[in-house]
Amino acid sequence: MSGELVREGHSGTGPGTITPDGCAVELYSRLSAGDEPEVIEAAVPAGSSILELGCGAGRVTHPLVARGFRVTAVDESPQMLECVRGARTVQSRNAAEARHRLPRPTKPRGDHCHVCDHPRRRFPR
């Protein structure tokens, strides 16, 4: 395993770097977005700003950027964020911490920031 140590209670295997929550960066960089970008595009006004929490390697980020959305991609893993292209990236372990790392708007804008939260969840057995 390379990169950061895996947090207690998490484990992971796979090619390349393993993130603190046990995800293999190389594997995640190969996953397809499925229909998530289409669902978001249908629900969010064109050209809006999107705050994507738990963006990973950009599986959903990249198609959203290609559709003209302004994406701020947040993830705890710098190795995952290295895979993200075309979006502003913020390294943060959680949404509250990320909020403090994002610039505050100086005036209201015509578009809204929409949150896309789809990190993989793990539940105890």
Image (cartoon, helix red, strand yellow):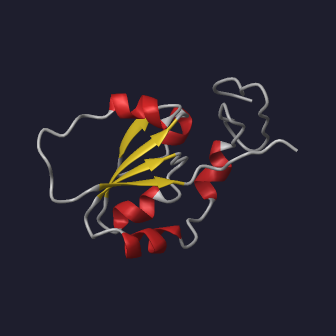
Q: Quadrant of residue 17?
A: top right
Residue farthest to the left, as pictured: 107
Residue 91 in view, yes or no: no
Q: In x, y percent, where is residue 35? A: 54, 73
Residue 2 location, x and y as percent? 69, 28
Q: 115 or 25, which lies in front?
A: 115
In-image side of 16 versus 97 (left or right): right
Name the residue rendered at 66%, 31% in the picture.
20
Tell me if residue 40 comes above or below residue 12 in the rendering: below
Residue at (64, 27) in percent of width and height: 3
**Count of all numbered marks drawn on residues in the image:** 0
At x 21%, y 59%, the residue is: 111
Q: Position of residue 82 (x, y in %)?
A: 48, 40
Q: Tell me the quarter of the image containing the C terminus.
A: top right
Residue 108 is situated, as x and y percent measured from the top left of the image, at 14, 48
Which quarter of the image is occupied by the N terminus?
Answer: top right
